[in-house]
Image (tube, helix red, strand yellow):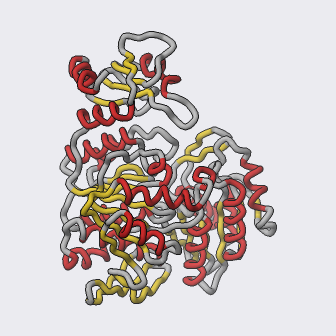
Amino acid sequence: MESNNIIEIIKKLNIRNIAITAQSAEPNQIFFALPGISRHGNDFIDIALANGASLIITDQAHITSYSNVIVVKNITLVMKDIVNYLYPKFPKYLVAVTGTDGKTSVVNYFQQLCMLAGEQAASIGTLGVITTNDHLNKRLNQNKTKPECATTMSYIQTRYLLHQLATNGINFVALEASSHGLDQNRLMDIKFQAAAFTSFSRDHLDYHKTMNKYLDAKLKLFKENIVSNGIAIVNNNINELSIIQSKITDEFGLKLLSVEQQGDIQIINVQSSLNGQKVHFRYKNSDYKFEVLVIGRVHITNILIALLLAVNAGFDSAKLIPLLSNLKPIKGRMEKIQFGNCYAFVDYALTPNALATMLTELRTLNSKGRLITIFGGSENRDAIARRMQMGIVASKLSDLVIVTDQDSGNEDPAAIRKEILQVAPSAIEIPNRGEAIKYAISIMVDNDILLIAGKGHETRQVLKGRIINYNDMEQVKLHLKQLNKMSNQ
C-alpha cells in the first residue's frame, strides 16, 4: 500500500501521533513494527493493539490477521512519509554535536547562549530535552524509554520533539548525535545547518569493533545530515584531525571552522582554580577575556565551540562574547560541592580519556591534599579492555581509588569490579555506591578532593537487571548532612 493511501486511513481514524513503543501505545496512535538489532517489531504488535493502537504498519506478515495491520514493502520510506505528515515542523536553526566526550556540554552551552541572547532555544540529548519552559520540559521528557534518556533518540522521537519545539516557538535547537544513533540511521533525512566534532577516543568498540568504523560512524553526520552550505566545527586537539579535516572539506565539501591551536578561535591562556576559570582567547584578530564558574579546561573548548555554533546561527559575536561569563555549570559535569576545605566533584566521565582529563585537571588545581576517585564499570561498554583502562588511569592519577558498582545491567557487578581490581590492586572495593561515597567523605581531611565518576546527572542505577533510584550528588549531600549531625552531637 502506498503512503498516500495510508495517510488517508490516518485521517479517517483521526490518528494524531506515533507510538514510540508498543508498551506506550494509545488510541489514536499508529505503531510501526520496525526491524531491530535483535528482535522485530512484529513481536510487539499484540501489545500495541492491546494498549489501544489504532493502526499498525509492518514489513512482515503477522501470524494473526488483523484488519488494522498493514503490511508494506518499504517500511522506512512509509515511516518517513507519515512522520513528515504528522510532524512536519522544524525549528529555524538546527545544529548537531558528535564526539566521544563533550556532546552534552556543547549542546547545553549553545542552548544557554541563545537564551542569554534573547532567543528561545533547546538542547536534546543525554539530559533529555531542555528549554526555558518547565511545563514543556516535563511534557517532552515524560516518554523516556530507557532508565536514562538515550543520547540520540529514535527518528520518530526526534521528529516529534523538533515538531513540538517548533510549534512552541523555539527557533534554535542543538542535538547530540551519538555514533550508535548515526550508525543506526536515527537521524535519517534530518538536516542541520551546522555540526561540531568535539573529541575522539576509544569507546563503544563492543558495538563498532574497530576505531576506523567508530570514526566512520561519527563522520556520517557530516556526510549525510548537513545542508550543502552548512558549517562544520572541530576541536583541533583531536589526534585524528587530519583525517577528519580531509573528509569534511575535500570529500563532503563543507566549510570547516575550528577551536584551539591555530583555529578560528585560539585559546591564549586559561587560569583555572577550584572556583572557576579566567579565559583569554583570540577571534578574528581580536583578543577577548571572560571568567566562568565552570570547572575543567576541556569545558573552555566546549564553550568556544558553542560560541562558534551560535555565531554561525546568526548571532552577533560582539553581543555573545560578553555573555560567556553568564554560562552556568551543567548538571553532572564537574558538578561541585565544597565542605570546609574539601571538595567533591560529580562527573559523567565514562571513558578512560574523560577520566584522565578530569583527574589531571584536579591534580593541577590541588597540590596540597589527596585526590580520591570513586568509579565502577558499566554494562557492555567495550567490556574488559575499557574497564581495565579506567582502572589503570584511576590508579595512576589518584592517591586513593575506590572501586564500586555503576550500571552492571544484566552482568554480575562483582565480576565487573574484579576486572578493574586486577589492574588496581591497591584500590578499596566497596560494592554499594552510596556506601563508597559515605566512606570517602568520612576519611577526607583538609584540601582533599573527591571525584565521583561515571554517572553524573543520572537518577537511576541498573544492577542485575533491577532499576533503583539513585543519584551521586544526592548521596554526597545526604552523607554530608549525616556527618554534620554527628559532629554537632
Outermost residue on the front side: it is 251
Residue drawn at (65%, 44%), measured in percent from left and top? 463
Q: Is residue 8 above or below residue 264?
A: above
Look at the image and tell me whether residue 453 can be seen. no
Q: Is 62 positioned to the left or the right of 377 in the image?
A: left
Quarter of the view holding residue 103: bottom left
Residue 280, percent across and down? Answer: 36, 87
Say left or right for 202 vs 77: right
Question: In which quadrant is the C terminus drawn?
Answer: bottom right
Q: Relative to 129, is 72 above or below?
A: above
- Give the number of marks: 0
Q: Residue at x 30, y 64 (%)?
A: 112
Residue in the picture at 67% in, 41% down: 410
Q: Is residue 446 above or below residue 472?
A: below
Pick the front one: 228 or 177? 228
**Residue 107 locus on image (x, y percent):** 36, 61
Q: For the point 30% across and 75% down, which residue is it?
A: 324
Q: Quadrant for residue 376, please give it.
A: bottom right
Looking at the picture, does residue 112 appear above or below residue 397? above
Q: Is residue 180 visible?
A: yes
Q: Nearer the viewer, residue 112 or 34?
A: 34
Report x, y in % for residue 398.
Answer: 68, 75
Task: Residue 396: give x, y in percent of width and height.
Answer: 71, 75
Please state, as top left, top right, bottom left or bottom right, where the N terminus lies in the image. top left
Q: Is residue 482 left or right of residue 8?
A: right
